[in-house]
């Protein structure tokens, strides 16, 4: 990923990040996933309003993250996964 994704908040306890996508100019929420032999991050696009809310309301951010982990918001994925999509860890 290089320097494309810049985390501005990280929850160690709940294993997610919020940040800024330098390439697209958008904000994101991300969390780690694994396919067994490799771990990577899934990045979901946020609106500016969502980002501002989640920065001050981690409970709301966690509700959003959990829905992403259940793959209910795949239309917001910044990078589409391959055929062997990982599972949230």
Image (spheres, rainbow, N blue to C red):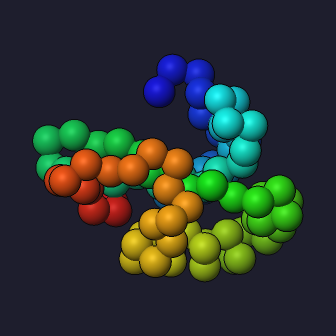
| Residue 36 x/y as whole percent | 15, 49
* Residue 12 x, y percent position in the rendering: 54, 54
Task: Determine whether 85 is above or below 22 in the image.
Answer: below
Residue at point 51%, 65% (across, down):
75
What residue do we see at 35% from left, 42% from top?
40
Tell me the residue at 50%/56% (across/down): 77
Is 60 positioned to the left or the right of 49 in the image?
A: left
In the rendered structure, the answer to whether residue 44 lies left or right of residue 82 reads: right
Q: Does any portion of residue 12 appear in the rendered image? A: no
Q: Quadrant of the C terminus?
A: bottom left
- Residue 6 is situated, as x and y percent measured from the top left of the image, at 66, 33
Q: Report the front residue among 30 and 74.
A: 74
Left or right, 64 with reference to 59: left
Number of numbered discs on residues: 0
Towards the viewer: 67 or 13? 67
Q: Residue furthest left?
A: 37
Left or right position of 81 against 78: left
Residue 80 shows in this picture? yes
Residue visible at 76% across and 60% down? 47
Q: Position of residue 68 (x, y in %)?
A: 48, 70
């Amino acid at each position: 990923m290089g320097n494309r994704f810049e985390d501005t908040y990280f929850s160690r306890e709940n294993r997610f990040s919020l940040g800024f996508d330098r390439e697209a100019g958008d904000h994101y929420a991300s969390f780690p996933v694994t396919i067994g032999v490799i771990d990577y991050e899934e990045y979901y696009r946020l609106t500016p309003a969502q980002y501002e809310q989640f920065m001050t309301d981690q409970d709301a951010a966690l509700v959003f993250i959990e829905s992403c982990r259940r793959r209910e918001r795949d239309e917001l994925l910044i990078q589409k996964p391959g055929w062997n999509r990982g599972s949230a860890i």
